[in-house]
Amino acid sequence: MYVKGVNATTLDDVRAASSTSKSQLYQHFADKDELVRAVVSRRAGQVLEREQGYLERLRSFRGLQRWRDALVQRNALQNGAYGCALGSMASELSDQDDEARQTLAEAFAEWTGLIAAGLRRMQDAGSLSNSADPDKLAVGLMAALQGGYLLAETQHDITPMETALDMALDHVRSFLTR
Amino acid sequence: MYVKGVNATTLDDVRAASSTSKSQLYQHFADKDELVRAVVSRRAGQVLEREQGYLERLRSFRGLQRWRDALVQRNALQNGAYGCALGSMASELSDQDDEARQTLAEAFAEWTGLIAAGLRRMQDAGSLSNSADPDKLAVGLMAALQGGYLLAETQHDITPMETALDMALDHVRSFLTR
DNA sequence: CCTGTACTGGACTATATAGTCCAGTACAAG
DNA sequence: CTTGTACTGGACTATATAGTCCAGTACAGG
């Protein structure tokens, strides 16, 4: 579903990829919508777990740069194709399945929250000015990331993702105290 | 297609919306893919025409703010639903129809180019520092816009779009000379 | 080993959707 | 008015895909 898109993925694709049969599929999921929602939940969990690993100890600008590098490097492996696992599903499902939309909205909120918490630790450590608003900065970083993913996916080139993230980081840098 | 998504839109939907018949449809388009590509081209043209109207005379930071306001206001009308006409198609089609992907990539490039040209006029007018890189700033603004669209679409709330654009504008502001 | 229960594979059905086709119609040219 | 041409509506077909069903199998409990 990540590669082909949710709607373009058939239950036969799922059956083949999972080496199971239709009856097993319908033993676990009432219909395709429910399967899709399960995929959304699982992916959201995976992404958040991964991001928590990068972000939970974030407390310096250097750490933010490492976070950026990891995301760019991961996306470079596929030349930007497929975009962000959450972003592409959000775009496709938001106006089609309200339950999925809400799950994705919560995931984005949590993800953004991880960044904001890191920025707050930077403030506590005295490296980020208290005049900075961690929540707003985090939303800006997330938007730069998602926009960067989309442009990179469309161009099959990660340069715009790098540029977007670097600009967002530059902005955070302007709030550093030392 | 903008509202339901490209893949979820059936030819019967198209027929009903256009008050035509299948034979007329197939008189103009060889198959659904060709129709989709025509939609992509047309939408890209419309968006670029609209944006050109806003951006071709841009030569001040104030103008950039008006541009931001117009986009936010337009998106607020539908509470963020459906996202950016180009962005949502880019996300859905990029890994499915390479021809559509290229058209969209060119449209994004042109759109970003309109912004960059405006920033260059700001430099010529002396209000934007020559140390600023208009092309990179334009990519950053476009990413903030697209990421903002996506977050707003997912949350059904335009606040993150405003926050993202404001942060990008703040960054541009830091390059102002007066 | 025997029996009952729960699960499995995959054939099958129903349906939505892309794509075809042709009788009928409008209309221009003579 | 007559004829020929191009176009139209919408019924029709083919096919992909979601969803159902049941005979067969594994396996636990006695």
Image (spheres, coloured by chain):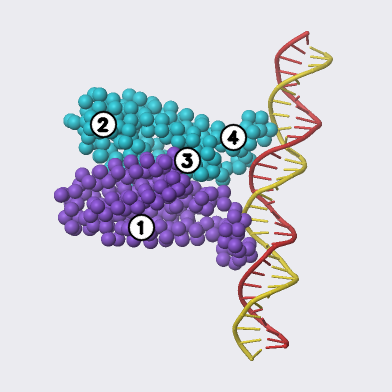
Chain colours: A cyan, B purple, C yellow, D red
Left or right, C2 with respect to B118, comes to right
Amino acid identity at mark 2 = Phe
Residue topped by disc 4: A34
Left or right, D22 with respect to D26, comes to right
Mark 1–mark 4 Cα distance, whole angstroms, equals 40 Å
| Occupied quadrant, residue D11 | bottom right
Dots 1 and 4: beta carbons under 8 Å?
no
Q: Residue at x 44, y 39 (%)?
A: B155
Q: Residue at x 28, y 38 (%)?
A: A169
Within 10 Å of the Cα at label 2, are there few (<14), some (14-19), or many (20+) other Cα atoms? some
Q: Mark 2, mark 3: which one is toward the viewer? A: 3
- Residue A61's disc is 2
The one nearer the camera, B72 or C28, is B72
Within 10 Å of the Cα at label 4, are there few (<14), some (14-19), or many (20+) other Cα atoms? some
Image position, residue C1 (x, y; %): 83, 13
Q: Mark 1, mark 2: which one is toward the viewer? A: 1
Numbered disc 3: secondary structure: helix
Numbered disc 2: secondary structure: helix
Tags 4 and 2 both on a single chain? yes
